[in-house]
Image: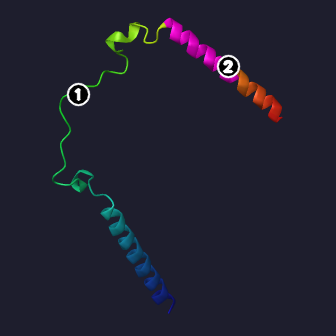
Amino acid sequence: MLALRDLQKTRLACGALLIAALALAGCSSQIADLTPADAQAHPKEPGAYLPVHDLPPDRDQATIPPDKRAKIEAELAAARDRQAVAAKDAK
């Protein structure tokens, strides 16, 4: 009677291992097989984007005239000062 239980446990363990092996084998499908048939191929030539380290040709010229730049900086400084005062009043 004891040997019969051992045989049943062995069969159960082998069955569980077989099912696990089959389940894991199903997960090993190739990624390339999952792509649709009408998917576009990757271009062989690089795109028209500039490399990261290259700068546009007009980068050395100032884009904002100095008088407007000074006005903007003064407005930003005034806004910063107003926020500092408001933060002190809130405490």
Quadrant position of residue 24 = bottom left
Give me the residue at 40% from left, 7% from top: 61
Where is residue 73? Give x, y as percent: 59, 14
**Residue position for label 1:** 46
Asked if 69 appears above or below 19 in the picture, the reply is above
- For the C terminus, give its image quadrant: top right
**Residue position for label 2:** 78
Asked if 5 appears above or below 27 in the picture, the reply is below
Give me the residue at 36% from left, 73% from top: 19
Read off the magenta span: 66-80
At label 1, which amino acid type do we have? Pro
At label 2, which amino acid type do we have? Ala
Where is residue 89? Give x, y as percent: 82, 31
Asked if 29 appears above or below 49 in the picture, the reply is below
Q: How many C-alpha atoms fall within 10 Å of the one at disc 1: few (<14), some, or many (≥20)?
A: few
Asked if 42 appears above or below 30 in the picture, the reply is above
**From the viewer's perspective, is the residue at label 1 or at label 2 nearer?**
2
Q: Tally the numbered discs.
A: 2
Where is residue 3? Give x, y as percent: 47, 87
Q: In the shown orientation, is residue 27 left or right of residue 4?
A: left
